[in-house]
Image (cartoon, rainbow, N blue to C red):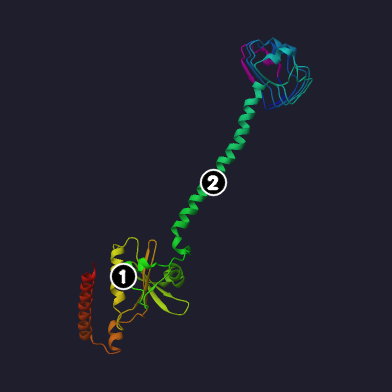
């Protein structure tokens, strides 16, 4: 809204609220506003009004709110207007005596300003806290989902764990590996190094810094094989060292990780390693039968040795 305030507004005798704040009004406040005897709220803030405040506004007995802030008004403020419950005359050129006739009443601005101050401080803090919680939760889930790729903790298996598995320290061919060693050997268990998948879990190919190639069976979380089966397999295979069997080099038990480390053999048939290049299926089957019988007898003996 531009220009001066229309004088005809003073003829609206039943008007109770007149709100013309935050516009582009200029010129003086009409004297005819004194005829608005039922007016309760007068808001003319944030305009370009000039001149003096009409004394006729003192006749508005029903007025309980008046805001003339941020204009170009000057002169004295009628005393009756300073008695209005809520008033604001700041941002003008009035002759204000801050001790006897203040231009602004505390009940007008103190509470809104305090609310704005609180909002200006609290809202950014709450937003920052929400962002921090969200980022922390995301980082924690991300780290948890990839912990096996970033784990650098080196934990050695203690003597009581060796005894629990039934592997004596005198067995120099069996090694308890650190998880970080196997992680490095398999390049963080990369898909390129995966040889296959079995009931126990995935099998990975790895290579130690000295050039030794290994095959690692990693117990999957969804595998039905628990720690007891894992322990039995370690105890059984560790005692079965034969030139025609894949040699068990060691194992790794760290937290939820349970892995068996075998020597790596190229992907060729069983009869090739037993008979060389000559194939003899019948002989291979007979040998395999005796091998199973041998495993059975060893297993029976181990159960008899258990207390």
Choose mark 1 or mark 2, whichever is in front.
1
Total labels: the figure holds: 2
- Position of 113 compared to 179: left or right? right
Q: Is residue 11 magenta?
A: yes
Residue nearer the viewer, 91 or 179: 179
The image quadrant of residue 194 is bottom left
Image quarter hosting the N terminus = top right
The image quadrant of residue 70 is top right
Residue nearer the viewer, 292 or 21: 292
Q: Measured from the top left, where is residue 129 in percent x and y? A: 54, 43
Label 2 sits on a secondary structure element that is helix
The residue wearing badge 2 is 131
Magenta stretch, residue numbers: 6-18
The residue wearing badge 1 is 166
The image quadrant of residue 239 is bottom left
Q: Measured from the top left, where is residue 50 in percent x and y? A: 77, 22
- Position of 252 compared to 307: left or right? right
Q: Residue at x 27, y 84 (%)?
A: 271
Can you say whether 120 is above or below 69 in the image? below
Residue nearer the viewer, 291 or 106: 291
CA distance for labels 1 and 2: 52 Å
């Amino acid at each position: 809204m531009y220009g001066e305030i229309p004088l005809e507004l003073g003829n609206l005798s039943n008007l109770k609220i007149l709100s013309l704040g935050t516009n582009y009004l200029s010129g003086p406040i009409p004297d005819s506003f004194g005829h608005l005897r039922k007016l309760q709220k007068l808001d003319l803030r944030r305009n370009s009004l000039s001149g003096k405040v009409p004394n006729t506004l003192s006749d508005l007995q029903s007025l309980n709110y008046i805001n003339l802030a941020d204009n170009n008004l000057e002169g004295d403020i009628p005393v009756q207007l300073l008695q209005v419950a809520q008033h604001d005359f700041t941002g003008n050129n009035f002759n204000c005596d801050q001790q006897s006739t203040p231009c602004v009443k505390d009940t007008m601005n103190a509470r809104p300003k305090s609310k704005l101050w609180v909002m200006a401080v609290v809202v950014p803090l709450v937003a920052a806290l929400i962002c921090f919680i969200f980022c922390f939760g995301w980082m924690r889930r991300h780290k948890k989902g990839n912990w096996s790729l970033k784990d650098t903790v080196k934990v050695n298996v203690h003597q009581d764990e060796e005894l629990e598995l039934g592997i004596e320290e005198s067995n120099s061919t069996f090694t308890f590996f650190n998880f970080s060693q196997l992680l490095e050997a398999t390049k963080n268990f990369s898909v390129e190094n995966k040889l296959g998948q079995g009931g126990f879990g995935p099998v990975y190919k790895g290579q130690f810094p000295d050039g030794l190639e290994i095959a690692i069976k990693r117990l999957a979380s969804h595998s039905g094989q628990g720690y007891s089966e894992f322990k039995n397999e370690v105890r059984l295979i560790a005692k079965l060292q034969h030139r025609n069997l894949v040699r068990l080099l060691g194992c790794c038990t760290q937290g939820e990780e349970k892995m068996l480390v075998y020597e790596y053999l190229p992907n060729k048939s069983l009869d090739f390693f037993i008979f060389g290049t000559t194939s003899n299926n019948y002989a291979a089957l007979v040998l395999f039968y005796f091998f199973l019988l041998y495993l059975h007898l060893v297993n029976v003996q181990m159960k008899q040795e258990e207390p």
